[in-house]
Amino acid sequence: MNGYGVSLSRPMKQLRVILLCALPVLAQPPAGQPPSTANQLGPVAQETADQAKALVAQMIQALGGDAYLNLQDVSQQGRFYSFFRGEPTSTGIPFWRFVKFPDKERIELTKHRDVVDIFAGDKGYEITYKGTAALDPKQLSDYLRRREHSLEWVLRQWLKEPGVVLLYEGTAIAADKPADKVSVLNARNDSVTLYIDSSTHLPIKKTYSWRDPTDQLRNTEDEVYDAYRLTEGIMTPYSITRFYNGETSAQRFLSTVSYNQNLSDSMFDAKVPAEIPKK
């Protein structure tokens, strides 16, 4: 049971935790190029920082440049596959996802679209046939953590913060592709590492780690992006695979993606009927 009277299978429970933040909240984009990483660096460190900054700027341009940075909203439809200890546990669950920037998100689950999660700022709600209730605190905490470490959040929020450092860490192999490895560190002693395709300059992989507040163990979460398509001026990954501590935990395959559809605010209000765009 999910706590609100709806019995959910393991795939459905995992979907709540894993699907959230597939395309998280966007902060305002930095003006021009990514900012300088530090004011006082030695010659070698400065060269490394400049190289990292150039690679990140190149990656943003490959994603769509201004079109990518100035997104207003996103609509997605696709299918989700859950895993347990690296083995698939479902035949796929359909989902619909709507994001209105900067801080509104709606996810509809099952073919009947009858289980809905809504996020507004740092609040989360679940809507079922039983009504509306606050989202489980663990699910909300996972969502907020993933949002803060998402590719979009790092590129639009972290890079604007004072004290941020970009570090080029050489070449690597990510998802069987040659990549340039760049780490972004903020003043909170937190970091995200990006693997950028050496040929296309698109992000291949993102990884970060955190310490669990309960057991104090350090966990790692990776996301691999594939099957890019140019969609309304944005290079969009239609395949996203997530790994938890080295094991596959989920895969998402998108069937349709639309940008800047002028989504209604009522879609993200848990207290009023939603105005879902017609297809």
Image (cartoon, rainbow, N blue to C red):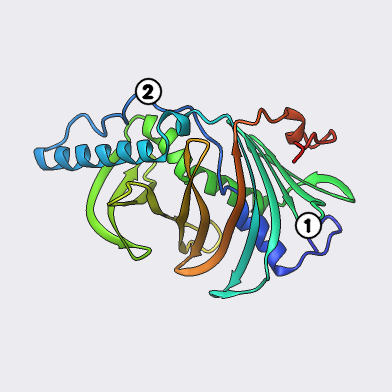
> What amino acid is at disc 1?
Lys
- Which quadrant does the N terminus fall into? bottom right
> Dot 1, crowdedness within 10 Å: few (<14), some or many (≥20)?
few
CA separation in Å, label 1 and label 2:
41 Å
Secondary structure category for the residue under label 2: loop
Q: Which residue is painted at 39% across and 46% down in the image?
A: 190
In the image, what residue type sits under mark 2?
Ala
> Does residue 78 appear left or right of residue 248 in this picture?
right
Q: Residue at position x 49%, y 61% from top?
A: 216
Which SS class for mark 1?
A: loop
Find residue 28 and report its horizontal and vertical position in percent: 48, 27
Please give the name of the residue rendered at 59% of the width and 53% of the height, measured from the top-left corner: 254
Q: Residue at x 30, y 29 (%)?
A: 35
Quadrant in which the C terminus is drawn: top right
Q: Which residue is mark 2?
A: 31
Residue positioned most to the right: 130
Q: Residues within 10 Å of mark 2 (few under 14, many from 20)?
A: few
Relative to 80, 38 lies left or right: left
| Mark 1 lies on residue | 111
Q: Quadrant of residue 185?
A: top left
Q: Is residue 162 visible?
A: yes
- Mark 1 or 2: in front is 1
Is residue 66 found left or right of 143 in the rendered image? left
* Residue 152 in the image, given as x and y percentages of width and height: 47, 40
